[in-house]
Image (spheres, helix red, strand yellow):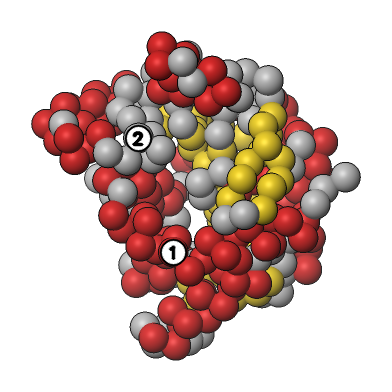
Amino acid sequence: MLDLDSINTSFSRKALVYDAYGAENAAVRWTRAQVRTQVLQMAQPGAKILELNAGTGEDAAYFVQHGLRVHATDLADGMVAEIRRKIERENLHGRLTAQQLSFLDIEQAPGGPFDMVFSNFGGLNCVPLAYLRTVAEKLPLVLRPGGALVWVLMPPVCPWELAQALRGRFAVAFRRVRGHARAHVEGAYFSTFYFYPSHVIQLLRPNFVGFRLQALSVFSPPAFMEGFPTRWPRLFHALTWLDARVSRWPLLNSIGDFFILTGYRVPFSPAGRKDRGEG
């Protein structure tokens, strides 16, 4: 049984410090940049995006400033309040809209069909795979044929977490290997689940095709190693450089702190689509 109230409480409290944490953490900034680049490459000018687990709307506001339209949804009322403050503060009316909504109920999102369904930073990892199947089955209700999917999820294998065993931090090292772990965020507890990319792809078939994977933070340190970039900035830069070049390689593209899974809803004609940024 999902404890949606605990998830709401956790992330509503987190909303007050979320933007500052992301701005100060070099690993978060680098990871977010990789995701944003992927979205902008896949989205056509003026595309309409449905964002699940939008948090405080950092990504949504960024995409709007780059010519896209976003309907941002989140279960946590505190997060949605932050999105609405951004809309007012940055004058994003008409281009960015916000709704308190669980991703389990995406069919209730108004304004569809959308050109892309996007979810960042493992928001979808708050449910077991069986619930994720429900989300996958509902995607055709909100995403137009040929529309794009960009999901950023947490896999069961993260080299930097496994390496914590060398420091005696066995709970951290092996929490993903079990397939789920108890998360503690701002005084509230809820379960986090870890997915193999192949299992998620299986849920999305046959409604989606053209799947691609990109790993995030295989060699470079993930966000919980927040002191690393400050202590060893040159090494951090070298590791992110390496990650950017090998993150799509087979085997490596399925591990790390996160992976980006992209695909297109059928029918899809590769010859008829050209990602932004291509010559």
Mark seen at residue 122: none
Give the class, few, some or many, for how many residues have Cα within 10 Å of label 2's Cα (few <14, many ≥20). Answer: some
The quadrant where residue 54 appears: bottom right
* Residue nearer the viewer, 141 or 26: 26
- Is residue 7 visible from the viewing direction of this image? yes
Disc 1, SS: helix
Q: Position of residue 138 (x, y in %)?
A: 78, 52
Q: Residue furthest right?
A: 1
Residue 184 coordinates in the image, percent (x, y):
61, 45
1 lies above or below 143: above
How many dots with numbers? 2
As measured in the structure, the alpha-carbon distance from the residue carrying label 1 to the one carrying label 2 is 18 Å
Q: Residue at x 16, y 27 (%)?
A: 235
Q: Relative to 80, does residue 128 appear above or below in the rendering?
A: above
Residue 31 percent coordinates (x, y): 36, 43
Labelled disc at residue 225: 2
Q: Which residue is mark 1?
A: 17
The part of the image, by quadrant, that contains residue 17 is: bottom left
Q: Quadrant of the N terminus?
A: top right
Where residue 35 appears, x then y in whole percent? 40, 46
